[in-house]
Image (cartoon, rainbow, N blue to C red):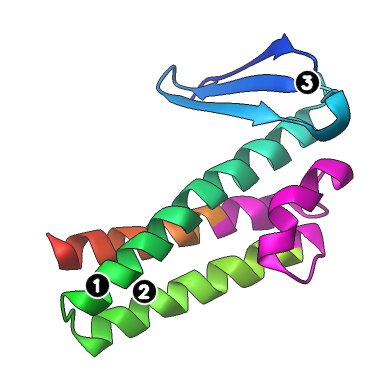
Amino acid sequence: MTFNVGFLNTGLHMLSINDAFFLNITVGGGSAIDLSNGAQLLSLMWTLMFYSQYDKFEALYERALLEDVDNETLQLALEKYNNATDGMLSAWEFGDIDLLRTAFWAKKVARVIYLARDAYLGMREAVNILEAALS
């Protein structure tokens, strides 16, 4: 897996993974991200990838409810979602997943980076469960 991070202009950065996954990142107040700091880059990457899956899960879960996906599948997906969310909060030592979306820029480095990675992988698994149920 290759990561490319570029500075576009003051406060705006771009992240690509394997030249296929692009994110434009705006940092409030025009502040910069230290792109040479590996811990900061990993924290940023896993957290942004987590939120990409988090948003996808939210939409898929609503659709799954409307399409009468069985309760067992919904419970399994929701359990993975809750575990992943708790993991991300633990990684950043933060209490609210929606506030973390903007607050992690100020902290810049997750306290426990591997928990952020595990949270992303767990959220991706929750999304995969719902996608399989809806296909």
Q: Does the magenta stretch include residue 109?
A: yes
Q: What residue type is labelled 1?
A: Ala
Residue matched to label 2: 77
Per the rendered image, the range of residues in magenta is: 91-119
Q: Which of marks 1 and 2 is nearer the N terminus?
A: 1
For the residue pair 74 and 98, the one nearer the viewer reads as 98
Q: Which amino acid does label 3 sit on?
A: Leu
- Tell which tag, 1 or 3, sits nearer the viewer: 1
Q: Where is residue 40 in the image (x, y as percent from the top left)?
A: 79, 34
Q: Quadrant of the C terminus?
A: bottom left
Q: Height in image: 130 above or below 48?
A: below
**Of the numbered discs in the image, which one, if any, rests on residue 64?**
1
Label 3 element class: loop
The residue drawn where x is 40% and y is 54% is: 56
Horizontal side of 48 relative to 105 (left or right) equals left
Q: What residue type is labelled 2?
A: Ala
Q: Which of marks 1 and 3 is nearer the N terminus?
A: 3
Tag 1 near tag 2, CB within 8 Å: yes
Q: Where is residue 130 in the image (x, y as percent from the top left)?
A: 27, 66
The residue drawn where x is 42% and y is 64% is: 58
Q: Residues within 10 Å of mark 1 (few under 14, many from 20)?
A: some
The residue drawn where x is 77% and y is 31% is: 27
Residue matched to label 3: 35
Q: Residues within 10 Å of mark 3 (few under 14, many from 20)?
A: some
Q: Earlier in the sequence, mark 2 or mark 3?
A: 3
